[in-house]
Amino acid sequence: MSSAKLQELQKLSVRELKEKCRESKMKVGGTKGELLMRLCGMEKEKPKASRRMSVQAVNKWLEREGVNDPERVSKCLRAGIQKGYVDISGDSPLDNVFAEGQCSACENDIKATIRDLLYQPDYAGLDYEDGGLEATVKCPDEDCGAGVYVTRICCGSHEMDCGKFHNHCIACPGFGKCIGDYREEHCTSCGKHFFAGSGGQFPCSCTRSASEMFFPFF
Ligand SMILES: [Zn+2]
Ligand SMILES: [Zn+2]
Ligand SMILES: [Zn+2]
Ligand SMILES: [Zn+2]
């Protein structure tokens, strides 16, 4: 767009600019400045709207990258991709190194690619007691081989963990979110998270009276 054209547009009223937007099948909301930018094709995308993908878009993207069963892919990872916390640029994005850290058992350096994290369990439970047998990321040292979890991918503040604090709630809407400690649970009554204890012995404060009514043997 030439600057002469822009000057031409600047002379128009907001109402006239909106009319032009409508003619070009563009959105008609916003200030005069925003309308001008839109008509010149220079409108800045709102960062939030452009960064967040839909649930379907994430699954489609995984399929395009050769993942046959996106529904089985870690929801923590998918939430991280959805929110733009995972770098999916490049020719072979699944091989991008996403996390780096140290093995908690032998202090070896560990790198985890997106591919390594595809099928990482969203809930590690008591796996930390067994050295991370279920973890998909392993220490590269053959004598060690300890499993590590990359947690909080969905929060944009990921870190490597033995698994004790890797607890991504899949009962939350969408892909869910990380809630930390393995003893935290999602309350199906109030939708909040609460400390349930290692054997789920503590009810959520919202249901305490109800559970006492329905389960008098508690
Ligand atoms: Zn190790
Ligand atoms: Zn939840
Ligand atoms: Zn998470
Ligand atoms: Zn509750």
Image (tube, grey):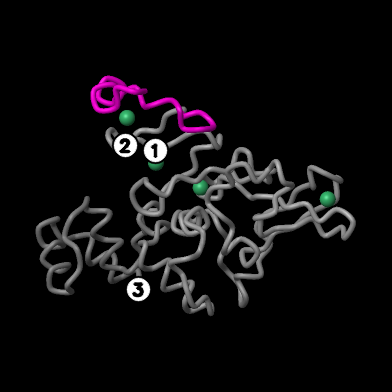
**Ligand 2: which quarter?**
top left
Across and down, in percent, residue 154 comes to 50, 49
For label 1, being within 8 Å of ligand 2 is answered yes
For label 2, being within 8 Å of ligand 2 is answered yes
Residue beneath disc 3: 2
Q: How many C-alpha atoms fall within 10 Å of the one at disc 3: few (<14), some, or many (≥20)? A: few
Relative to residue 87, is residue 202 drawn left or right?
Answer: left
User: Which residues make up the magenta segment?
Assistant: 196-218
Q: Secondary structure at mark 3?
A: loop
CB under 8 Å between discs 2 and 1: yes
For image coordinates 16% across by 62% down, the residue present is: 17
Going from N to C along the chain, the mark reached first, 3 or 1, is 3
Going from N to C along the chain, the mark reached first, 2 or 1, is 1
Q: Secondary structure at mark 1?
A: strand
Quarter where residue 71 is shown: bottom left
Mark 3 or 1: the one toward you? 1
Relative to residue 162, is residue 205 drawn left or right?
Answer: left
Secondary structure mostly taken by the magenta-highlighted segment of the chain:
loop
Q: How many C-alpha atoms fall within 10 Å of the one at disc 2: few (<14), some, or many (≥20)? A: some
Amino acid tagged 2:
Gly
Residue at the far right in the pictured view = 143
Going from N to C along the chain, the mark reached first, 2 or 3, is 3
Determine the CA span between mark 2 and mark 3: 54 Å
Determine the CA span between mark 3 and mark 1: 56 Å
Label of residue 191 in the image = 2
